[in-house]
Amino acid sequence: MRFGPLVFLSAFFALSLSWCGLVLTPQIQLGRAVQETNSVAKSDLYPQERPGLARQGLQVYRANGCAYCHSQQVQQNGTLVDVVLTDAGKNSNTLAEAVNASLHTNFNAVGLAGGLPKPLLRETTMEEASSLTAVIKKAGGNSEMHLDPTGPDIERSWGKRRTVAQDFLYDSPVMPGSQRVGPDLANVGLRLPDLNWQLIHLYAPRAQVQGSPMPRYPFLFEKRKIGSELSADALHLPQEFAPADGYEIVPKPEAKALVAYLLSLRADTPLYEAPLTPPPARPAATNAPATNAPAK
Amino acid sequence: MNATGITSPAGNTISTSEIDESCRVPLFTLFVSAAVWAVIASVFGLIASIKFHDPNFLASCSWLTYGRVHPLATNALLYGFAMQAGLGVAIWIIARTSQAKVVQPWLISFGGQLWNLGLTVGAVGILAGDTTGFENLEMPRYAVVFLFLGYLLIAFFSLFTLHNRKEPVLNPSQWFLLAALFWFPWIYFTANYLLLSHTPVRGIVQAIVAWWYSGNLNLVWFGLVGLAVVFHFIQEFMNRELYNRQLVWFTFWTIILFASWSGIPHSAPAPAWIPALSTVGTVLTAVTVLSVMMNICATCGHGCSQKENPPPGKFIAFGTMAFAVSWLMNVVSAIPGVSAYTNLTWFTVAQWQLNIFGFIGMAVFGAIYYIVPQVTGIEWPCLKSPRRHFWLAAIGIILIALPLAIGGLVEGVNWHNPQVSNVDVAKTALNFLRVSTIGELLILLGNLLLLGNLTVLSVRYYQKHFVPAYREATAELKPVEAKP
């Protein structure tokens, strides 16, 4: 019964199955993925290719194994929905009755129609929000839903929404990481957009974060004698970490590239599979391509 | 135990000593190199671990930054030690159970040397910053070529040896080894071709392929080889057949069908069906653990506990327990509710270490301690050292896996509480990591013990076989010289 060919064919069959399932099918589904439309600013495409320096920085990130301590996978538990009334319609009395019946509130027509846009429901589920918007629409009004992704990672401000396949489209190698010795970096460019902060942090992490367990990366910097005057890109280090008098610390091209890459990490574009409502105060933030030049 | 030899049907009988002799050359290459890589892995593992005591330890040298030392340690452990020693044991098991001499031992040995050349080149590449960025696949492209060719040579002639077997029906260890020998080239070629060729797959598919490869390597390849070793030696030590062959066949199928889907974490930023399928496959491997443990318990019966277990048996028993624990950890941490807390933490590292070192490593150590004296005909120089090595390795791996598993859970709970700052979460986990440094140190000592023993044994073998031969050759000249 158990002859060689049978064992071989069993293994062949099982491995083909797994290969088709987890290599071939994902490649068919995702291998030819193209840019996707920003689901709010419809004229924008996402993602944009990272700028050249950031692409070099990805290679510095790879070579020094940053991914062994930092993941790039923001997790999301769910989405909370706010319903905001934007237009009370022609007959605000009908609308007020309908809303009151639905929400067990006691709005009057004038109160409801005044001061638009007016939030009606906060942090509710998609089902409740949809039923309310349906009621409003039936009564002739108009409303918007605001989507807020939730979860511990998002509360830690590691990201605005969960990380999706699209965020890695132009990266090679893709390094989503497997460990969180340090914080997630999927949106470090949004969270810590200061170029100088990043450079000093790479040179001496403890100069920026008290008690940080991150190692220093002095080999990405050059220590050199100050010439006639301090170099333009010399680091301004606190006393404790500063080099001896007469010397300055200047980032090497690798350090600049790595920081350019880190600053290009900002995956906050609303997408069909990961919707969110961009904060109204700074609409520009979501319209900008994810690969903008480092914010100054 | 079973050193008396295999009674084979009359005709072209091949004695056990002839089979052992044919194993000698490839096994010498594979075992000594594996011991060297085990030491290298634990030295770099120790360096990586010390960096958690003081992040500035060796930080100013780019070659020794954590992000290079750590992947080197894991690659040396995976490919240098566990896989190489596993292949050596596999060759011996295949030759013994097939009652056939190893085909082309020198070419297998050459394959082993190619493998080691690839590893050395790759290790230097990783330290120089040429890593590929894919976990478990860090070896750069120029090293992969040697590794792949080396493996093909080893596997091809091992399969040839299997082909020359006396009995057409394969026994359980042989099923596992046949499947494993065939499995690796496929997954290794797929992963390297799709990730490191000039036109790699795009976007997240890269990460999916790398995860698929890791799952297939860590669970399927090492699972198949590790269980082949465990099953073979349990039969050999207990001097009886496995309790239920049908159940072993079932185990075999569950590994190749279910474990081959594992590896893609629940957190993966990919379409949900991919991690979901992977989770289903991983959870179903619980059946594998159950079937293996049932079979082994029934085979050993009361025999296990009553006899004083010699060191090789101790190693195998520990490996079996580590297999059950680590695979169950893998199952539990794949369940979505749990994986939110265990994934991306040290828990996964604990599971990985327990699987690779606790299960495969220990099983292979036991096999080496049993095989080498038989193949060379020389006892271990220090008879107590296998026992000492066992305790060092066993306590070492427990001191790594236990603190990291607990630390990982604490870390996972802390990451879920946004009130705890990033630095505080990392610092809490550091305390557990620091305990694991002691484990790394013990394992290093154990590995040094094995390497030392193998070296002394090789010297003695040389003295026993080459020196007399040399003397004989020179002695004949004397009378000739004396006459004139």
Image: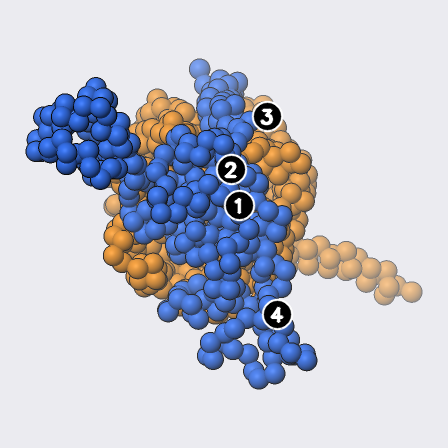
* A265 vs B18, nearest the viewer: A265
**Circle 2 marks a residue in which chain?**
A
How many discs mark residues in the rendered view?
Answer: 4
Q: Colour of chain A?
A: blue
Residue at x-position 52% and y-position 31%: A35
Q: CA distance from mark 3 to mark 2?
A: 57 Å
Answer with the quarter of the image where residue B51 lies: bottom left
Q: Name the secondary structure under disc 2.
A: loop
Q: Which residue is mark 3?
A: B164
Asked if the residues shown at circle 4 and circle 2 are in contact, with their CB atoms under 8 angstroms apart, the answer is no
Task: Tell me which amino acid carries mark 4.
Answer: Ala
**Circle 4 marks a residue in which chain?**
A
**Circle 3 marks a residue in which chain?**
B
Q: Which residue is mark 1?
A: A291
Q: Which chain is orange?
A: B
* B126 vs A184, nearest the viewer: A184
Does residue B453 appear anywhere in the picture?
A: no
Asked if the residues shown at circle 2 and circle 1 are in contact, with their CB atoms under 8 angstroms apart, the answer is yes
Identify the mark nearer the N-term, 2 or 1.
2
Q: CA distance from mark 4 to mark 2?
A: 33 Å
Q: Which residue is mark 2?
A: A47
Q: CA distance from mark 2 to mark 1?
A: 8 Å
Task: Tell me which amino acid carries mark 1.
Answer: Thr
Q: Are marks 4 and 3 on the same chain?
A: no
Residue at x-position 34% and y-position 38%: A277
Identify the mark nearer the N-term, 4 or 1.
4
Q: Name the secondary structure under disc 1.
A: loop
Q: Which residue is mark 4?
A: A232
Q: CA distance from mark 1 to mark 3?
A: 61 Å
Task: Tell me which amino acid carries mark 3.
Answer: Asn
Asked if the residues shown at circle 3 and circle 2 are in contact, with their CB atoms under 8 angstroms apart, the answer is no
Residue at x-position 48% and y-position 48%: A265
